[in-house]
């Protein structure tokens, strides 16, 4: 659900706005205080911004990790925190497009990574940059050129890599496909083929598989792969991409997104958290962040709020941080990481894990969908005056989160880590298949919200008087509540 649809407008707000529309007078509305999870998201983003150096986040083996930097940029864009750092990161990523989506830096020419290119397209949009001229590259045109055509059979619509050598099966996955759908939807018309390929990665239970390929080669669909492992993180990404596609008018996207959200609900732990399978069976903030963001985008507010509560429990504060209190705002990958940091601080070895966990986890706190980052106003942690009853989103998308988000732990396959999971901890990738719950909530359209207009037919002095009286009474009640 878009942020603008979460904001409480109330009778007083509606009255003042309607009156302003009639009289032409400016309105002065005070927004309601933000939920605690929004403040937690901004605290996390502030900590993450402090980890940037000259517009980039470091990796465990290099001074700049461009995949992680993109994740950080999307996270900061989702919260609106630290505009100078966001601008510097946008400029740095634009300057290093080929460092991220090719092997040029290693002297191997002729390779373009499809997933990394799609993620760059999305990131340019989320950062309000021009995706058709990002660092001198037309990322939309390049992404479109990497979409498999009709002669690829059941692989039609898949985002693929371009190479001059036979490198075997394509490494693209559902994260990459989701970024392709998000980026194309945000930068112009969205072709149906990439959406159809993404939908084919959904099994009948509702969850999505991470990889389109089985051990013996590409399988036409998730249901055609016996024993396909369904993945919480991939499902969360796909749900958000399909919501953006549905808003763009893509066929079948809304129903698939709803089924995916219903399946995610069946995977939520009692405390609101999410986990993977295999080595990452336990609850972790990466999976919880993405799943919570997707549930919020799909209108599953109760489940999204429970995920936010689980994430907040892993966040360091001045009160609970102990030896790591100087890193207040950071979010641990899991409870073990939180406990260790509280006892001994965040060590240099562990800091990379905290950066990756925080960048993705805070998306489940901010709850701005990947399809709306850079379009809807970021959540604010304090009431601020505004000239209209609810913030107005920019009217023209620039091309899109992250996240992932985005930012997702399983990440896109590419020459450098994109949204990899925390260091020293395998990425959360899978969740055991489960029977999807019966569809109960239709995903909300992620379009900009706003109050209904009053139209031009209102000319009655009686109505104006009623509005004045109602507005005065309501504002008086609201004023007393604020003073109490």
Image: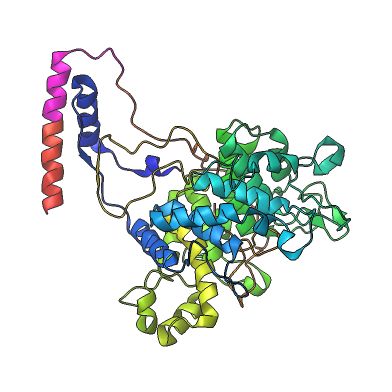
- Residue plotted at (45% across, 55% down): 86
Q: Position of residue 74 (x, y in %)?
A: 50, 54
Q: Is residue 253 above or below residue 221?
A: above
Identify the image quadrant of the C terminus: bottom left
Is residue 272 in the magenta section? no
Q: Residue, x 74% and y 52% (percent of image)?
A: 112
In the displayed structure, would residue 360 be above or below residue 150?
Answer: below
Does residue 437 appear to the left or right of 2 in the view shown?
A: right
Is 300 in front, or is 402?
Answer: 402
Q: Which residues are magenta?
A: 455-470
Can residue 135 be seen here? The reply is yes
Residue 260 position within the rendered picture, expressed as x and y whole percent measured from the top left? 61, 48
Q: Nearer the viewer, residue 475 or 44?
A: 44
Q: How many marks?
A: 0
- Secondary structure mostly seen in the magenta stretch: helix
In this image, 376 relative to 254: left or right? Answer: left
* Residue in the picture at 66% in, 74% down: 279
Looking at the rendering, which quadrant does residue 42 occupy? Answer: bottom left
């Amino acid at each position: 659900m878009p942020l603008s649809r979460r904001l409480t407008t109330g009778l007083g707000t509606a009255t003042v706005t309607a009156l302003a529309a009639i009289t032409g007078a400016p309105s002065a509305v005070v927004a309601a205080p933000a939920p605690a999870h929004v403040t937690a998201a901004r605290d996390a983003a502030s900590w993450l911004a402090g980890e940037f150096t000259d517009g980039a986040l470091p990796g465990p083996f290099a001074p700049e990790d461009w995949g992680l930097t993109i994740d950080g940029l999307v996270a900061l864009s989702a919260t609106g925190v630290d505009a100078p750092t966001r601008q510097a990161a946008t400029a740095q990523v634009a300057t290093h497009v080929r460092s991220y989506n090719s092997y040029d830096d290693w002297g191997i020419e002729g390779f373009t990574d499809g997933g990394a290119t799609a993620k760059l397209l999305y990131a340019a949009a989320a950062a309000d940059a021009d995706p058709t001229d990002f660092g001198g590259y037309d990322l939309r045109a390049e992404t479109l050129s990497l979409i498999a055509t009709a002669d690829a059979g059941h692989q039609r619509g898949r985002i693929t890599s371009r190479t001059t050598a036979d490198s075997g099966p394509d490494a693209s996955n559902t994260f990459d496909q989701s970024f392709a759908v998000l980026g194309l939807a945000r930068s112009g018309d969205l072709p149906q083929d990439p959406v159809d390929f993404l939908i084919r990665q959904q099994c009948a239970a509702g969850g999505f598989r991470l990889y389109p390929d089985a051990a013996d080669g590409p399988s036409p669909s998730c249901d055609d792969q016996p024993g396909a492992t369904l993945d919480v993180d991939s499902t969360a990404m796909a749900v958000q991409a399909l919501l953006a596609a549905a808003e763009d008018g893509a066929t079948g996207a809304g129903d698939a997104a709803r089924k995916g959200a219903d399946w995610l609900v069946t995977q939520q732990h009692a405390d609101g958290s999410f986990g993977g399978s295999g080595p990452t069976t336990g609850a972790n903030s990466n999976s919880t962040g993405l799943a919570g963001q997707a549930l919020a985008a799909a209108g599953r507010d109760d489940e999204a709020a429970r995920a936010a509560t689980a994430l907040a429990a892993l966040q360091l504060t001045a009160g609970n941080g102990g030896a790591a209190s100087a890193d207040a705002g950071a979010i641990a990958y899991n409870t073990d990481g939180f406990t260790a940091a509280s006892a001994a601080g965040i060590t240099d070895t562990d800091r990379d894990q905290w950066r990756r966990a925080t960048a993705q986890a805070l998306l489940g706190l901010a709850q701005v969908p990947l399809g709306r980052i850079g379009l809807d106003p970021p959540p604010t942690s304090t009431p601020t005056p505004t000239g209209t009853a609810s913030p107005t989103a920019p009217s023209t998308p620039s091309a899109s989160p992250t996240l992932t988000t985005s930012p997702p732990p399983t990440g896109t396959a590419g020459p450098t880590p994109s949204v990899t999971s925390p260091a020293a901890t395998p990425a959360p990738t899978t969740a055991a298949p489960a029977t999807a719950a019966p569809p109960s909530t239709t995903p909300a359209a992620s379009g900009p919200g706003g109050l209904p207009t009053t139209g031009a037919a209102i000319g009655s002095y009686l109505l104006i008087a009623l509005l004045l009286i109602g507005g005065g009474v309501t504002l008086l009640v609201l004023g007393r509540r604020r003073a109490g």
